[in-house]
Image: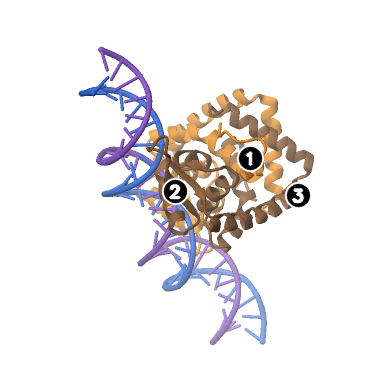
Chain colours: A brown, B orange, C purple, D blue
DNA sequence: TGTTATTATATGAAAAGGAATATTTTTAGG
DNA sequence: CCTAAAAATATTCCTTTTCATATAATAACA
C-alpha cells in the first residue's frame, strides 16, 4: 500500500510514532466500528471500560486513563450520566473530587461491550500469534514506562 | 499508577487495544506538545509529514495515511491551503481526484518539524533501547499486516 | 452510447474536542 | 485562624470531527 519510490523514502515510513499510531488505529478500527454499531462512540466505550472492575474513578483519573483531557472528560461523563450509564457524586473526603461509577444499566452495557472486545481480541491474537503478541505487549509496556509517564 | 486490587483486575489492564492506544498516546504526547508550541495541530502535522517526499497525495490517500476520515481530511487540506502550506489541484487524468502537494512554505515548515521529530525519535529510541526498538517495530508491522489492512 | 453504478471529494448540521479560565475546595505558611 | 497557593472539576468560546448526503466524474454494461 502507498506506493513509493525506493530512492525517495517518505519520512513517515521510518517514523516510529507514526508506526505506533497506525498500528493502534488499524488494530482498533474493526472493533470501534462494532462499538458504533452498538450505539456508542469510542470515548463512551473507553470510560465504561475504564470503570469496569475499578470500584469507581474520579474525572481526572478517567481523563488520564482514557487518554483524554480533563474538560473533555467532564463532558463525556456528563453525557454518560444523562444516558443513565454512570453515576456521579462528590467524594465525601475531598469535595473537589467527583467519583464516577457504573450504573446498573452501565454495568449491563459494558458487560456486552467487553464480551465483544474479548472476542475481537481473541481473533486478533490468533492472527498475530500468541508468542508475537507477548513480545508486542512487553515492548509496549517498555514504551510506556520509558516515555516519561511511569 | 492507577492503583488496583489484585483480586479484581480491571478489564483494560489486559486489553491489547488499550495498551496499543496508550503506548501511542504516551509516546507521542511530548512531541505533539512541541508541534502545538510551534503553532500547528496534530492533524496539520500529519498531513505535512505525509506529503514530505511523497510527490503528492490525493485527499483520500491522505485520509487513509493520516488516520482520518475523508470529510475531515477535505477540511484539513482546505485549512492548509488557506495557510499557504499546501497546494491543491485536480488530477488531470481523473478529475474527481484532487492532488495535494507541499508549497514552498510548506516544505520549509515541514522540514523544521521533521527535524524536531527526528530529534525526539532519537531520544525515544535511546530510552527504549535500539534492540528493543527493532523488536517493537517488527511487532507493530505484524499487527498492521494482520489487522486486515495489508 | 445511454443509463446505472461506482468512486472521489465537498458540504452542512450536529457532536465532540481543545484552550483558556472560572469556581470550589483543600492545603500550606505565617 | 487567615490568607495565599494549589488542586479538581466545570464552563465558555472556538475549532475540529463526524455523520449523512450532495455533487461531480468515471466505469460498466446492456
Local SS, label 1: helix
> What chain is tagged by disc 2?
A
User: CA–CA distance between discs 1 and 2?
Assistant: 23 Å
Mark nearest the camera among 3 and 2 is 2
Q: Position of residue B44 (x, y in %)?
A: 44, 44
Residue plotted at (61% across, 26% down): B125
* Whether residue A51 is visible: yes
Badges 1 and 2, same chain:
no
> What chain is tagged by disc 3?
A
Q: Quadrant of residue A32?
A: bottom right
Mark 1, residue position: B13
Badges 3 and 1, same chain:
no
Q: Position of residue B130 (x, y in %)?
A: 67, 25
> What chain is tagged by disc 1?
B
Q: Is residue B16 above or below residue B92?
A: above
Mark nearest the camera among 3 and 1 is 1
Local SS, label 3: helix
User: CA–CA distance between discs 3 and 1?
Assistant: 21 Å
Q: Is residue A112 above or below residue B137?
A: below
Local SS, label 2: strand
* Whether residue B93 is visible: no
Label 2, residues with CA under 10 Å away: few <14, some 14-19, many ≥20: some
Mark 2, residue position: A88
Mark 3, residue position: A127
Mark 3–mark 2 contact, CB under 8 Å?
Answer: no
Residue in front for this viewpoint, C15 or A110: A110
Q: Is residue B60 above or below residue A132?
A: below
Mark 1–mark 2 contact, CB under 8 Å?
Answer: no
Label 1, residues with CA under 10 Å away: few <14, some 14-19, many ≥20: few
Amino acid at each position: 500500500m502507498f506506493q513509493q519510490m525506493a530512492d525517495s523514502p517518505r519520512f513517515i515510513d521510518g517514523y516510529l510514532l507514526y508506526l505506533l499510531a497506525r498500528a493502534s488505529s488499524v488494530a482498533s478500527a474493526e472493533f470501534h466500528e462494532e462499538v458504533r454499531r452498538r450505539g456508542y462512540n469510542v470515548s463512551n466505550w473507553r470510560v465504561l471500560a475504564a470503570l469496569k472492575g475499578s470500584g469507581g474513578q474520579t474525572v481526572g483519573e478517567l481523563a488520564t486513563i482514557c487518554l483524554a483531557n480533563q474538560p473533555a472528560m467532564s463532558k463525556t461523563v456528563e453525557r454518560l450520566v444523562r444516558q443513565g450509564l454512570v453515576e456521579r457524586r462528590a467524594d465525601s473526603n475531598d469535595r473537589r473530587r467527583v467519583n464516577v461509577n457504573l450504573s446498573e444499566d452501565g454495568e449491563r452495557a459494558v458487560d456486552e461491550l467487553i464480551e465483544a472486545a474479548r472476542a475481537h481480541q481473541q481473533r486478533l491474537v490468533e492472527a498475530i500469534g500468541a508468542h508475537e503478541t507477548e513480545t508486542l505487549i512487553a515492548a509496549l509496556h517498555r514504551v510506556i514506562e520509558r516515555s516519561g509517564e511511569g
